[in-house]
Image (tube, rainbow, N blue to C red):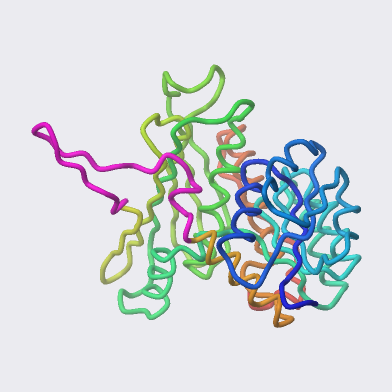
Amino acid sequence: MGDLLGVAVLGAGHMGADHIRRLEYVVSGARVAAVADPDTARAKAAVAGIDGIAVHAETAAALDAPGVDAVLIASPGPAHEEALLAAFARGLPVLCEKPMVPESTGALRVVEAEARLGRRLAQIGFMRRYDAEYRQLKSLLDDGRLGRPLMLHCIHRNVSSPPGFTSAMLINSSVSHEIDAARWLLGQELTAVTALRSRSSADAPEGLLDPQFVLFETEHGALVDVEVFVNCGFGYQVRCEAVCERGSARIGEGHTMLVTSDGGAREEVPQDYLVRFADAYDRQVQAWVDATRQGRVTGPAAWDGYAASVVAEAGVRSLETGDRTTVDLAPRPDLYAGH
């Protein structure tokens, strides 16, 4: 490995292009060595103005490009399993955007493949673990000063949903972040899901069940509720309140610029997750680069990606049936004993 970590970025869409920018201009210790995207014109646009980056249409070509030491996967979720297994076969450390693999069977194959290696190579991109407010809440809950956590109340709102967004994706794409955050904050697995439908907003696309209310139960009796509303129209909001035996703590109040004019006051609301969590993405990638250059793998593991997929699938089944649905995880390999 040279002085800079050479990273192959897979996917040059909205997320991939932002990671290319981040690796080149924000974090230290890394450079983009190759980019792969079936749309090579899009990939070339994402690396415009950056010298020395090979652009490929195929994943394998990017992984085998000269100077590649590690991989950042930002392609669509269905492509992740193949890319992860290809990186494992080459012994390349990986930062993989969520969902690790949308289907739990494929996610389990990734877990089993990494377990056979006997060492971790993958970090999964649940970036809320790197957000300053979430880390502060995690520290507060861990030190026990408020007693045991009893409930988490969560809000996840988007301005609008992209074309093709489905009712199931409110859970397996949007709420997947809350699934991981809840597991991490509480240090517990989620054991059952009940997904409830309100009447759909008039601003939701035809046929989309939006908003939804999702209730999770944990292995030690805590409850987690999530309001997910992906066509709220006014901004991107993520909030979480922990209710404990001796107090509560709330994050995500949006302490942004307050503009006072014309006899009123207006608080700006972020319009995009890349704005709200910009610092978290930066810290996540910097932590991954630093650890990888030292030969270590930290952060959310493949097991966390698998658990999120299983819980999300149970949530989608509950949405479809209207029933409380249990979560059935496979036995956890020893490699992930701390996750």
**Residue under the image location 66 percent in, 77 percent down:** 291
Vertical arrangement, residue 147 with respect to residue 84, above or below: below
Residue 116 in the image, given as x and y percentages of width and height: 88, 72
Instruction: Decide whether residue 246 is among the magenta residues.
Output: no
Q: Is residue 65 left or right of residue 73?
A: right
Residue 41 in the image, given as x and y percentages of width and height: 77, 36
Residue 232 in the image, given as x and y percentages of width and height: 40, 31
Closest to the observer: 55 or 299? 55
Vertical arrangement, residue 210 with respect to residue 265, above or below: above
Vertical arrangement, residue 168 with respect to residue 35, above or below: above
Closest to the observer: 255 or 150? 255
Residue 25 in the image, given as x and y percentages of width and height: 58, 60
Q: Quadrant of residue 140?
A: bottom left
Closest to the observer: 258 or 158? 258
Vertical arrangement, residue 167 with respect to residue 314, above or below: above
**Residue under the image location 36 percent in, 61 percent down:** 242
Q: Is residue 15 left or right of residue 32?
A: left
Instruction: Decide whether residue 278 is among the magenta residues.
Output: yes
**Residue under the image location 86 percent in, 71 percent down:** 91
Q: Which residues are magenta?
A: 254-279
Q: Is residue 286 left or right of residue 182?
A: right
